[in-house]
Image (cartoon, coloured by chain):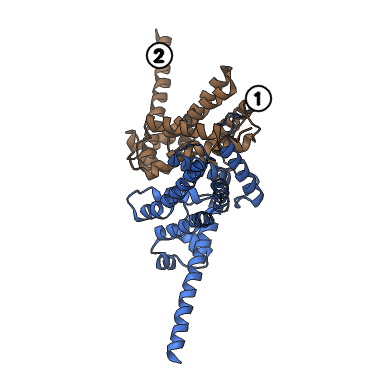
Chain colours: A brown, B blue
Amino acid sequence: MLPLRIEDSVFEGVKDERVTRNQLLDAASAAMIEARTPDVSLHVIARRAGLTAPLVKYYFGGKDGLLLALALRDAGQALRELEDLMAQDLPPDEALRLHVAGIVRSCARHPYLNGLLNLLLREEHSRPAAVIREKFIAPMVEAQRRLLEQGRACGSFRDVDPGMFYFVVTGACQHLFSTRVALNHPLNGAPADEKLACDYAAAAIDLIFKGLLKGEST
Amino acid sequence: MLPLRIEDSVFEGVKDERVTRNQLLDAASAAMIEARTPDVSLHVIARRAGLTAPLVKYYFGGKDGLLLALALRDAGQALRELEDLMAQDLPPDEALRLHVAGIVRSCARHPYLNGLLNLLLREEHSRPAAVIREKFIAPMVEAQRRLLEQGRACGSFRDVDPGMFYFVVTGACQHLFSTRVALNHPLNGAPADEKLACDYAAAAIDLIFKGLLKGEST
């Protein structure tokens, strides 16, 4: 029985480690929402998780590692949804609408995310910056480029620059929430509610897809 | 001659004070561009202006005062341009295009501005937050609301929610520059060049006004 018991305890250990890592990421997320900035101390995050700062260092190799893990977890969700969409072979118009709604949902859930990404990207030669560019920004731009190209090929979309499209759309999607966590009248520091996220997604999609002008699209 | 000499020296004093204040604001702006964040110390700003931190406190009453003065100077420019546009009685379509191009120019010149505004808005009951809301955000939303209403009345614009429009448009306008100062390949921390700002303004205006869909606007 000994080998089996050892194996059990190894699995237990792996499971515990994942649970603790997730606890710490949840604590970091909650601390950033409360502080209305991604700039919170390891000490605050650890205390919130009922752990100590050295343990954070043990699990993530330091604050940068924790911030990167959180950014990848939160931003990765939007990216995985996009990859699922691409695999479903939907009409490009529908896929892109669902994608934009997904970005808005992601920003509503994690209003600190845009600030967190900018914080990690600030030191452009750092490992976190390279990881964010490689694991998040490049695949997102590439997937959007493919959807835009498909839509243009089937005659649904006008010809727009994919790089510019990425910045216009992600900027539009995140701004309400990263600012609202600061403006914050009805929200009291909590993530935006589902209804606001839906309304904003609908408004952003309507404006970006149909444009402001009446009867000028050609 | 004595009263006149006193008056002269009073004017000199006022002029010197304005010059020093502007030197400090320029130094803060340059330090934020170099650090790629609005989060820079009074000490760094003062040293850059060849002055001392206590002198910054003398002129602006502390760091918050300096940050607020810089935000109002930089953001105020876009607002004054919008007020000039409103006074010119242009067709709403043209006025709104010029306004969006002005926001993009403003964000290109001051890539730290969005982060600076969020920093000041974070403490929602603080004086800086109240000043930014009252002197910048509220008049900007109101002016856009009037242009959207005029455009709708004359049949140029579709019916869009002015609050949502504000967040979509300002988010889209600032995102390239607040992120680019972080992504920062060709720019090396310098504000984006005129050409990039023009290209991005054109792309954002094209997408927001005409929309992505081909021949669907009604």
Residue A16 coordinates in the image, percent (x, y)? 39, 23
Q: Chain under label 1?
A: A
Please indicate whether residue B141 sits to the left or right of residue A122 in the image: left
Residue A19 coordinates in the image, percent (x, y)? 39, 24
Callout 1: SS: loop
Q: Which of these two is toward me, A150 or A124?
A: A150
Residue B52 drawn above or below residue A11: below
Residue B84 coordinates in the image, percent (x, y)? 52, 57
Quadrant where the image shows the C terminus of chain B: top right
Q: Chain under label 2?
A: A
User: Dot 1, how many residues are within 10 Å of its Cα: few (below 14), some (14-19), or many (20+)?
Assistant: few
Q: Name the residue under label 2.
A: A8
The amino acid marked with disc number 2 is Asp
Q: Which callout, 2 or 1, points to the residue nearer the camera?
A: 1
Residue at the image position 53 percent from the left and 47 percent from the top: B92
Callout 2: SS: helix
User: Dot 2, how many residues are within 10 Å of its Cα: few (below 14), some (14-19), or many (20+)?
Assistant: few
Q: Quadrant of residue B185?
A: top right
Which sits earlier in the primary sequence, circle 2 or circle 1?
2
Q: Mark 1 points at which residue?
A: A155
Q: Which of these two is toward me, A138 or A25?
A: A138
Residue A41 is at least partly visible in this image: no
Q: In which quarter of the image is residue A192?
A: top left
Residue A179 is at least partly visible in this image: yes
Marks 2 and 1: same chain?
yes
